[in-house]
Image: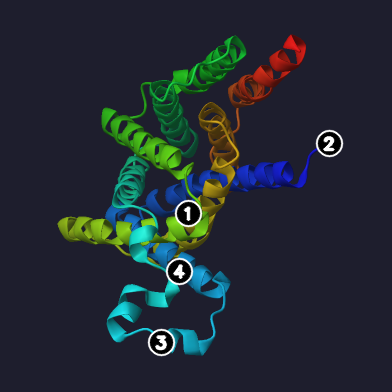
Amino acid sequence: MLNNNSFKAILATILALIAFAANSVLARLALEVPDIDPGSFTTIRLISGAVMLFILVLILRPKQPLNTQIKYPIKTLYQKAMLFELEARGSWTSAFMLFLYASCFSFAYVVLDTATGALILFGAVQITMIIMSLFNGKKLHASEWAGLILAFLGFVYLIYPNLGSPTLYGFVLMAIAGIGWGVYSVRGRDSLNPLLDTTFNFIRAVPFAGFFSILNLSNLSLGSDGIYYAIISGALTSGIGYAIWYVALKNLQLTTAAVVQLSVPIIAAIGGVMFVNESLTLRLVISTIIILGGILLVIFGRASFKIKAK
């Protein structure tokens, strides 16, 4: 029977994966026409996420009596704005990885469909996180290797017919986005306060996006629908979704965190069928079974072997 912490971890993981898939769908809706250029989509997405998360921090932070704030000199008040220190939350490295992911993600989705983009993205995420796990001294059990191989075969089976359609440009950009997200996820496992860390990672990522937008002014395109999708993607499925993911990461092994994200392309593909008029195929159904089977083997395989060993 699941305890309270296990239930919260499972719920957080499911919500985060749905948010990841929703980002792919929203990007495709905004960039397919295109109703907004990729640079503007990235910038609005990151700014919206930063604003939403900062509002949540203000609402959820512990209430302090007014007189405790007055005791600080003006300089100290500035440094401890809103009673938490910027230097202690998030990091510039994580913020850059967040920006790298978001920018490459947007440009790649100009030429990739929802499912293919998500598959390339989270295939790269999986490989990145597993490599980092191995470098950190993590040894994979035979069942975990089997699950990884099975999930990867499902990934290959789904993407194989379309290997010729994504341009090299789109494939490389989405792979870089996956590396950025993989590193960002690994760094998030040590977060003691997921909401604050995610908030300040987004705030730190805004200057990168702003500079990026200046370089992209010649391609500026701002349609109302595109702005709307970018705001939803930033405020809800990115900002809140990534904070939830940081919560989930505290209770997941790196290998498990890497593999469960392979379910995102399946969710994204279904979203593409429902909202972007992409087709649902038998190949998608079969690959779903293979990928999810591999995920389950990774998650539960090691535990079952430990039980047998006892």
- State the separation of the CA atoms marked 1 and 3: 37 Å
Name the residue tied to disc 1: 238
Residue mark closest to the camera, 3 vs 4: 3
Residue 130, percent from left and from top: 45, 24
What residue do we see at 47% from left, 30% from top?
119
Question: Mark 4 near mark 2, Cβ–Cβ under 8 Å?
Answer: no
Q: Amino acid at mark 3?
A: Lys
What residue do we see at 53% from left, 16% from top?
140
What residue do we see at 37% from left, 73% from top?
80
232 relative to 124 in the view: left or right: right
Between 172 and 47, the one lying in front of the other is 47
Q: Which badge, 4 or 2, comes first in the chain's sequence? A: 2
Q: Amino acid at mark 1?
A: Ser
Residue 116, percent from left and from top: 45, 32
Name the residue tied to disc 2: 1
Residue mark closest to the camera, 1 vs 3: 3
- State the separation of the CA atoms marked 3 and 4: 24 Å
